[in-house]
Amino acid sequence: MADLREIPKGKWFCCSDCGRIHSTLQKLLIHGAERLPDSLLDVLKKKYVEKGLDADINIDVRWRLLSGKFASPETRLLLSQAVGIFHECFNPIVDAATGRDLIPCMVYGRNLKGQEYGGMYCAVLTINSFVVSAGIIRVFGQEIAEIPLVATSMANHGKGYFQLLFSCIEKLLAFLNVKNIVLPAAEEAESIWTDKFGFKKLRPDQLSEYRKSCCQMVIFQGTSMLQKEVPTDQLVSSIERTELYKHMNQGRSYFL
């Protein structure tokens, strides 16, 4: 840590890793929607077949990272759709002090008195430019990232959309060299996260350690905190990361 005699002007970070992570996230915001490769779409086709749907239907599937701080008319529409999906799936999460619904604050990355959400991003999966699944992400550095809220629109449950979105989120975190993912899980959803996505329940001492360094971590009453290591087969080497970074700067595909 630097021996700070005064608060530095402009944007500043505790270490070079956090500066790199922030810079990369900003570039992804500018990069825009990413069309998914056929290897990931195979998961979707399999789900369509299981549901008795036409797997050969021509649909445009993309994922995108969004932030309310860098909103355009297009991204505001997508963020609004994400808020609608969260409200469709969850009751309002009300701040006791202000009475305000916290869901829009998290989606748009807005700070609220006593609540720090400014570093949150919203990842969305779109089908033909319409949001069908969304997740809130916040990266606390190389050690940990949190996903406090995820949801898929009611009409699209069971079609594999969130599985696709979560794959994109994992690839992003691997690209950022983040080691662990944590999230709060309601009792009825805990088995889905553990059995399907490979999460494990955090021990009280582990949670205590995380909260020391990530004091703003979102924990909802009545939920269990779960953790998963970013899969080792998705970790990106420094050389690969440099090449991917060049591709983003050139406006080319994030998924090589």
Image (cartoon, rainbow, N blue to C red):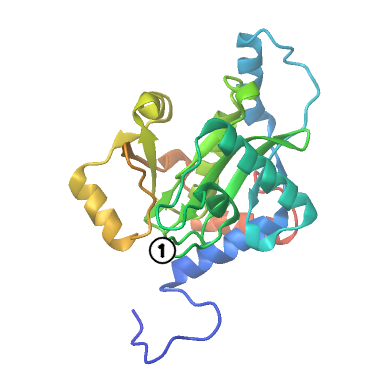
| Element type at mark 1 | loop
Query: Label 1 sits on what residue type?
Result: Gly
Q: How many marks?
A: 1
Residue 99 picture location, percent across and down: 47, 52
Corner quadrant of residue 200: top left
Does any portion of residue 176 appear in the rendered image?
yes
Question: With 214 as the anchor, is 146 left or right in this view?
Answer: right
The residue sitting at 77% across, 38% down in the picture is 129
* Outermost residue, top side: 52
Question: With 99 as the anchor, is 39 left or right in this view?
Answer: right
At label 1, counting other C-alpha atoms closer than 10 Å, the crowd grade (few under 14, some 14-19, many 20 or more) is few
Question: With 208 as the anchor, is 11 left or right in this view?
Answer: right
Does any portion of residue 124 appear in the rendered image?
no
Residue 10 picture location, percent across and down: 56, 82
The residue sitting at 54% across, 57% down in the picture is 239
Residue 59 picture location, percent across and down: 78, 27
The residue sitting at 46% across, 66% down in the picture is 18
* Outermost residue, left side: 205
| Quadrant that contains the C terminus | top right
Q: Is residue 224 above or below residue 207?
A: above
| Quadrant that contains the N terminus | bottom left
Q: Is residue 70 above or below residue 166?
A: below
Residue in front for this viewpoint, 1 or 114: 114
Residue 236 picture location, percent across and down: 50, 50
Corner quadrant of residue 189: top left
The residue sitting at 37% across, 40% down in the picture is 184
Residue underneath mark 1: 114
Residue in front for this viewpoint, 228 or 153: 153
Residue in front for this viewpoint, 95 or 129: 95
* Outermost residue, bottom side: 5
Residue in front for this viewpoint, 112 or 26: 112
